[in-house]
Amino acid sequence: MRRRRSAFTLVELLVSVVVLVIIIFMVSQLMSSTAAVTRTGNKHIDTDTQARVVFDRMALDFAQMLKRTDIDYYVKQRSGYNGHGNGHGWGQGKNGDKGSDQMAFFSAVPGYYPSNPAGEHSPISLVAYRVTESTQSWAAASYGRLERMAKGLHWAGVDDNNTTNKPYPIVFVPGQVTTGAGPWGSQWQTAINNDNTQSTSSDADYEVIGPGVFRFEYFYLLKNGRVTDWPWDRWLDTINRQKISDPPSIGLSQVEAIGVAIAVINPEARALIQQTAAGGAGNGDVLDIAADLADFKNANGVGNAGKKIGDMENKWKGVVESIAQTGQTPSNKLIPREAAKGIRIYSRYFDLKTL
């Protein structure tokens, strides 16, 4: 008796192959999506780490800030305040007065003197923060990056070290930093300058603390709860909204905390922008993006009780999302859309614990 042999028909083989192809396709899509999520996560980890390092350093500096009215600060406010410096959008960005802020203040944190071979530390320093905006070759390594300076000083009231190896003594007189007054003012001028002039803007005491931080903005939370870009309460009467222009020399005594916002880009996205920026006049770089991230005074509100926490940061996020969708900044500079996806916005408040 002849036995029948069982086997797959051609139709069954074709169905099996189709099912196998579908399974392989689904697995490959899943792997591709997982890889994309992993890449995005790694990019965010990089910017998160940078933001954490910068904010932790600022927390130490602000915690040890000398909060007195007989010393100098270089912090932001509008014209009319003669007690201390300006600091608002000093670098001019690439778009009018928009650009990263600067600040400088005395703090009881160790300062360093790179010229000292022994690597000595000082008991007090002049601390300064800025995003370098000079396009000169001497600033190429720090262009569009957050720098910190801790210029080593000491407590003595006289210059007992007149060599080039510092430290200079701190002098309790307003104007030492902001006007260059006094015997050591000219040594500290890089704390308030940020342009293409090497003699006034280049300083070996600066170091890049945030290689991915290309935008730096700060503002004040006053003790009465208002958020403003003036370090004092400009309104005598909250009902009649009576303004004052020149308050007494109060330093930062009305400030409860300093709020800091930064924009951070990961290395891959920065490299992509730099590559395309060299391709034509219409292509932008990181500071073109920074110029379109609103200053605090230009965000929602008018710098008084109408200002709300988070307004400016939300505007920044809107600009970044717009670039990711359109491939250009609001000022019509071309930016790779993929590069914009590597930018994140962070903010933190630092309690000054003023008296």
Image: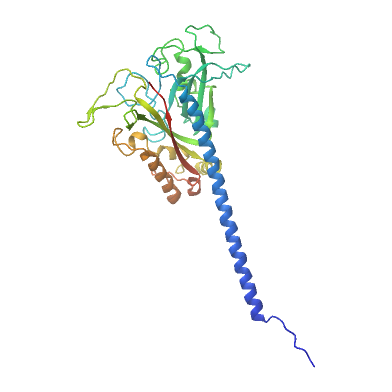
Quadrant containing the N terminus is bottom right
The residue lying toward the viewer, choosing from 170 and 236, is: 236
Residue 186: image location, x then y, percent: 46, 15
Residue 7: image location, x then y, percent: 71, 82
Is residue 332 something that shows in the picture? no
Question: Residue 255 occupies which quadrant of the picture?
Answer: top left
Please give the name of the residue rendered at 51% of the width and 43% of the height, measured from the top-left corner: 273
Residue 37: image location, x then y, percent: 55, 52
From the viewer's perspective, tell me whether residue 301 is left or right of residue 42: left
Which colouring convention does the figure follow? rainbow
Residue 200: image location, x then y, percent: 47, 21
Count the numbered circles shown.
0
The residue lying toward the viewer, choosing from 324 and 250, is: 250
Question: Residue 298 occupies which quadrant of the picture?
Answer: top left
From the viewer's perspective, tell me whether residue 301 is left or right of residue 142: left
Q: Is residue 121 above or below residue 299?
A: above
From the viewer's perspective, tell me whether residue 91 is left or right of residue 236: right
Is residue 294 something that shows in the picture? yes
From the viewer's perspective, tell me whether residue 78 is left or right of residue 325: left
Q: Is residue 155 above or below residue 17?
A: above
Please give the name of the residue rendered at 53% of the width and 44% of the height, measured from the top-left corner: 44
Q: Is residue 147 above or below residue 171?
A: below
The residue lying toward the viewer, choosing from 282 and 184, is: 184
Q: Residue furthest bottom?
A: 1
Q: Residue furthest right?
A: 1
Q: Is residue 24 above or below residue 344?
A: below
Quadrant containing the C terminus is top left
The residue lying toward the viewer, choosing from 142 and 55, is: 55
